[in-house]
Image: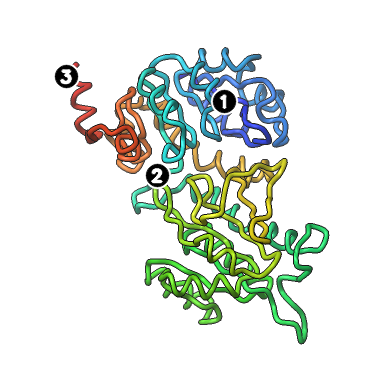
Amino acid sequence: MDIGIAKESEQLENRVALTPACARALTNAGHTVYLEQGAGEISGFTDQDYLAGGAKIVYSREEVFLRSKLMLKVRPPSTDEYNTMPEGQIVLSSFHLAVAPIEHIKMLMEKKITAIGFEVIEDDMGNLPVLVSISELAGQMSINIASYHLSNKAGGRGILLGGAAGIPPATVVVLGAGTLGMSAVRAARGMGCNIILFDKDINKLRYASELYQNQITTYLPFEQNIEKAVKAADVLIGAVLVRGEQPPKLVSEEMVKSMKPKSVIIDASIDQGGCIETSRPTNWANPTYLKHNVTHFCVPNMTSNISRTATYALSNALLPYVLQIADNGLEATVRGDMGFACGIYTYHGEPAKKVITSRLGINLKSLKDILETGKEK
């Protein structure tokens, strides 16, 4: 199969979908890999590294798209990239269609694109293996980011997260006990912070409480509980995930107004619309803004700033799925791997997710019905 690796067009997106080692695994399996010139440079992977792995270098976005049956990206495609996609292409990327422009969804359908969102691919246990690889890094990063933005240099409150003898540590409130939330808890706990963790799943809270020997505070996300915790927070981390959908706004603007001056919000759910009412997407050029005297950090592609580590993590998680598609074909992969099938947003342009049909006001067909209809044709 002809496989393309695009250079990310979004400003300050430094990651690349596959490392040279993974490109070699594909070429060794008999597939052709096309890399857009310079796609891996910021992550420390040169074109020569990919050439050594058997990839072929192409010199324009149009060429890499048109040569490839399967296109690999990191960030959701831009309008220009949607326009460049040839009809019937398979695209494996993050899509976040819950918050994408309607025009992009319509282009997937009109061009009969098979859109596979790596953020919704599941494994046999119902976990999200590709998303987990990035979320683990983002959770760890969030504490480093919070630490910096609490400093005087960044215009913060001038406090140290872990405190010191006779000085209490900062209070970190985490909304969500998934991979990202627990990674943030681990990093914050390692620095000695006071932790308040929320989740709607009591079993996740029980696990976290046992893991940290009852040294963190856990709550169910009732409004009264959140109001109380937010007032005490030096750092508030939004790590709420609703698979493929926008998360609920658990923190209202009134709650934000009640926070300590120059405290920090990191809304790590912002790529799906955010879980805090005052959040809006930012980027690494201007990552923060002040709202109600609270610093908001809302960068959707947070791990782009650690692009080499993030590329390794993403690439390791993606490679098995890329090999499945390339070796067995798309239909056999979809039929044989139900977890992978959960990642299908559109199949040859047919919507396979409620997030699409509800936004367009049309009826949802099951992926099984779509496959059978295609078979009849």
Q: Which residue is mark 1?
A: 5
Residue at (67% x, 20% y) in the render: 37
Q: How is the image coloured?
A: rainbow
| Quadrant location, the N terminus | top left
Determine which of the numbered discs, if any, sits on residue 376 in the image: 3
The amino acid type found where label 2 is placed reads Gly
Q: For marks 3 and 2, give the one nearer the viewer.
A: 2
Q: How many residues crowd around disc 2 within 10 Å: few (fewer than 14), some, or many (20 or more)? A: many
Q: Secondary structure at mark 3?
A: helix
Marks 1/2: CA–CA distance: 24 Å
Q: For marks 1 and 2, give the one nearer the viewer.
A: 2
Marks 3/1: CA–CA distance: 33 Å
Quadrant in the rendering for residue 164: bottom right
Up/down of 147 relative to 271, above or below: below
The amino acid type found where label 3 is placed reads Glu
Residue at (61% x, 71% y) in the render: 233
The total of numbered circles placed on residues is 3
Q: Earlier in the sequence, mark 3 or mark 2?
A: 2
Determine which of the numbered discs, if any, sits on residue 244 in the image: 2
Residue 96 lies, in percent from the top left, at 46, 39
